[in-house]
Image (spheres, rainbow, N blue to C red):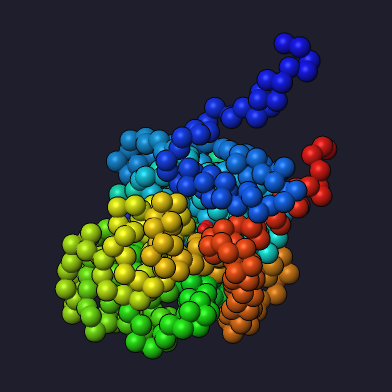
């Protein structure tokens, strides 16, 4: 091929073999979101391809001995999407449907989210394809420890810092911290966040994501003149994020009228007792059978009469098939990637305000950042101090995004991407390309 053949240009942009340009899952959703922001990036658009390729992907085989003596193999991942603004940061998911393409999308949304609230991190995410409900506690511990050792070459307090996500919690973070510390020969509390408070965890981290969801919800409600007192809330997923957000809205005078998880969908027009429902989910494993609630069909959940809808489960839940039926005035994305681009457009045309994941659920990583800072200084803050700082960061970030949306006449999602992508690509440009 001649040295200046124009097709050489195409070769430098060839997609890596693991990237499917026709991905219709979460990674495809993310790519469409990047395409929507590109016209607003000015000269930084030259760098936008950076955002369409994860920086580093590790796929690991995680073998463990089961309680019955057999050997089982699980597939695990850690993806570092972008490290221009700092070490990788993002949770670890244990779920039977986890795929590489999903973890890539989740890691990319971490890059955007971390930049949107201006914490000094890049984006990363991890996961194992496993249904943790089918494991004993011992099997779960062995799986977590082996996975941590396998991804040990990528993670570290200044390299990449995991945290909880779906089906992972403080206990799992404690095992990860312990395994990494044993492998490196020194206690390294800063290698993960979301740890139990007695092991260097932060007060307020467990509730932080739900508190962030609530905080931006309050700000947006003021802006659109929606009264929270008596407002009807529907929540999908009543785990860490959905449960806390539902409880905080109920404490503020709103009514949680409908909740859905994989065990069922429940409804009470007078409002469900959110605290009692959290306890019911913790002890019974789901919302089904909650006293004082009627059951409803899963599909009917999306059409329920409500003012605020909070998806707080998995990706792609609000899609072209159900978006038209949504009656809420506002959708607050507790989950990552719950709304497909087609559904985004439908909601926009219906006048429903969508507070996107990349700002609405950033409270968790914000308090993770506080935890990491506290671990480095070994000086711990009070819960009031943490909550006050969290609320301030969320309010300021949300106000900034709102302004950008108004100025550019774009959705809050595109506005958040404008703010975040400019920060990431500016950092990329300033750092340069060569060692
Ligand atoms: N934990 C955190 O700090 C953060 C989490 N997020 C995101 O929030 C979302 C929820 O995470 P988190 O609360 O931590 O996870 P949890 O594991 O605590 O809770 C997940 C909830 O979603 C429900 N769920 C799972 N699958 C479905 C389904 N197909 N239909 C309906 N409900 C379902 C689960 O119930 P069941 O299994 O019984 O159905 C459970 O109620 C995820 O998208 C996560 O990435 C975002 C930012 C931070
Ligand atoms: O707390 C963190 O570091 C990340 C939480 C997370 O995975 C998320 O925001 O989606």
49 and 382: which is toward the camera: 49
Q: Quadrant of ligand 2?
A: bottom right
The N terminus appears in which quarter of the rendering? top right
* Identity of the residue drawn at 38% across and 49% down: 95
In this figure, what is the number of numbered marks? Answer: 0
396 and 344: which is toward the camera: 344
Q: Is residue 401 left or right of residue 73?
A: right
Q: Name the outermost residue toward the top.
A: 1
Q: Is residue 38 above or below residue 322?
A: above
* Identity of the residue drawn at 24% across and 84% down: 270
* Identity of the residue drawn at 38% across and 88% down: 229
Q: Is residue 288 above or below residue 122?
A: below
Residue 200 visible in rendering = no
Q: Position of residue 337 (x, y in %)?
A: 46, 55
Q: Position of residue 205 (x, y in %)?
A: 54, 71
Q: Is residue 122 left or right of residue 136?
A: right
250 and 375: which is toward the camera: 250
325 and 155: which is toward the camera: 325
Give the image quarter of residue 371.
Answer: bottom right
* Identity of the residue drawn at 78% across and 47% down: 429
Q: Is residue 287 above or below residue 32?
A: below
Q: Is residue 261 above or below residue 253?
A: above
Q: Position of residue 367 (x, y in %)?
A: 59, 70
Q: Position of residue 389 (x, y in %)?
A: 64, 78
């Amino acid at each position: 091929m001649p040295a200046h053949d124009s097709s050489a240009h195409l070769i430098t942009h060839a997609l890596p073999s693991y990237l499917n340009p026709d991905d219709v899952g979460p990674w495809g959703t993310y790519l469409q979101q990047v395409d929507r922001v590109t016209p607003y990036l000015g000269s930084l658009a030259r760098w936008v391809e950076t955002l369409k390729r994860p920086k580093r992907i590790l796929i690991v085989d995680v073998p463990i001995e089961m309680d019955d003596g057999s050997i089982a193999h699980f597939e695990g991942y850690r993806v570092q999407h972008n490290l221009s603004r700092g070490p990788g940061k993002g949770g670890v998911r244990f779920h039977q449907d986890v795929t590489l393409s999903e973890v890539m999308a989740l890691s990319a949304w971490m890059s955007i989210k971390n930049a949107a609230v201006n914490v000094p991190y890049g984006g990363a995410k991890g996961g194992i394809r496993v249904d943790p409900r089918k494991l004993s506690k011992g099997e779960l511990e062995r799986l977590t420890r082996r996975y941590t050792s396998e991804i040990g070459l990528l993670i570290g307090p200044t390299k990449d810092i995991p945290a909880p996500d779906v089906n992972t919690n403080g206990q799992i973070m404690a095992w990860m911290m312990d395994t990494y510390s044993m492998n490196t020969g020194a206690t390294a509390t800063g290698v993960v966040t979301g740890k139990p408070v007695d092991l260097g965890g932060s007060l307020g981290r467990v509730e932080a994501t739900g508190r962030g969801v609530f905080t931006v919800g309050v700000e947006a409600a003021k802006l659109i003149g929606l009264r929270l007192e008596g407002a009807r809330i529907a929540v999908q997923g009543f785990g860490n994020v959905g449960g806390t957000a539902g409880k905080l809205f109920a404490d503020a005078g709103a009514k949680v009228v409908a909740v859905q998880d994989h065990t069922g969908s429940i409804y009470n027009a007078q409002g469900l007792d959110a605290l009692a429902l959290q306890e019911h989910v913790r002890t019974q494993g789901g919302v089904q059978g909650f006293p004082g609630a009627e059951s409803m069909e899963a599909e009917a959940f999306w059409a329920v009469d409500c003012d605020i809808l909070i998806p707080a489960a998995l990706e792609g839940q609000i899609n072209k098939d159900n978006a038209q039926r949504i009656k809420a005035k506002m959708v607050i994305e507790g989950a990552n990637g719950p709304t497909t681009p087609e559904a985004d457009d439908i909601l926009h045309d219906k006048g429903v305000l969508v507070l996107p994941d990349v700002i609405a659920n950033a409270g968790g990583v914000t308090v993770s950042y506080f935890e990491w800072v506290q671990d480095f200084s070994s000086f711990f803050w009070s819960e009031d101090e943490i909550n006050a700082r969290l609320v301030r960061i969320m309010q300021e970030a949300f106000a900034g995004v709102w302004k950008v949306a108004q100025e550019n006449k774009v959705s809050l999602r595109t506005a958040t991407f404008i703010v975040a992508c400019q920060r990431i690509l500016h950092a990329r440009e300033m750092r340069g390309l060569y060692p």
